[in-house]
Amino acid sequence: MSIIINGSPAALPADPRTSLLDLLRDTLSLPGTKKGCNQGACGACTVLVDGDRILSCLALAVQYDGRHVTTIEGLAEDGALHPLQQAFVVHDGFQCGYCTPGQICSAIGMAAEAKRGIPSHVSEDLSADVVLTRAELQERMSGNLCRCGAHNGIIDAISEYNTEVAA
Ligand code: FES
Ligand code: FES
């Protein structure tokens, strides 16, 4: 049994109680994914599994046999920041940075959900294409908390990134 982390295979833990978050941080020395609440309430541990965002603190690593996991360490290419990482820098989308890896992974998964037409709580027309307005972004990113209160910059960064991707 193995799991693909940022393109490289890794062995799954012998102990089936190990969370995906602990596998990443403690066994694979990938500390970019953060442990905040460890109970599904803050979003700091968000990673992508086959492109979908999940909370790695609530996931048992063994559930993901053969799946592709992307963490914040896997987003940069050829030493260059991912465009969304760059947008966070430009828009002051962080202060301490603790929530940032989860925010960025979550935003990438969120954009894919919107592209598939998945509505949110604030979507008015469930049959229309999703337009990522500020209200939609705020609602769709509401599972990722920022204790530093950088939410305005975070939404600005995500908004700019999605506008560029759509252009
Ligand atoms: S550490 Fe996973 S949601 Fe907070
Ligand atoms: S930048 Fe500090 S928690 Fe978000």
Image (tube, helix red, strand yellow):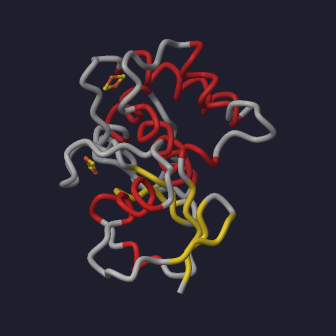
Relative depth, front residue between 104 and 74: 74
Q: Residue furthest bottom?
A: 1
Residue 99: image quadrant is top left
The spot of residue 60 in percent (x, y) is 33, 73
Residue drawn at (55%, 63%) of the image: 69
Relative depth, front residue between 11 and 77: 11
The C terminus lies in quadrant: top right
Residue drawn at (60%, 22%) of the image: 87
Is residue 33 found left or right of 43 in the rendered image?
Answer: right
| Quarter of the displayed picture in which ligand 2 can be seen | top left
The spot of residue 84 in percent (x, y) is 61, 31
The spot of residue 94 in percent (x, y) is 42, 19
Residue drawn at (19%, 45%) of the image: 37
The spot of residue 109 in percent (x, y) is 51, 51
Is residue 141 found left or right of 75 in the rendered image?
Answer: left
Residue 140: image quadrant is top left
The relative height of residue 90 versus residue 97 in the rendered view (above or below) is above
The relative height of residue 11 versus residue 115 in the rendered view (above or below) is below
For the image, the number of numbered tags is 0
Residue drawn at (34%, 56%) of the image: 55
The relative height of residue 41 versus residue 132 in the rendered view (above or below) is below
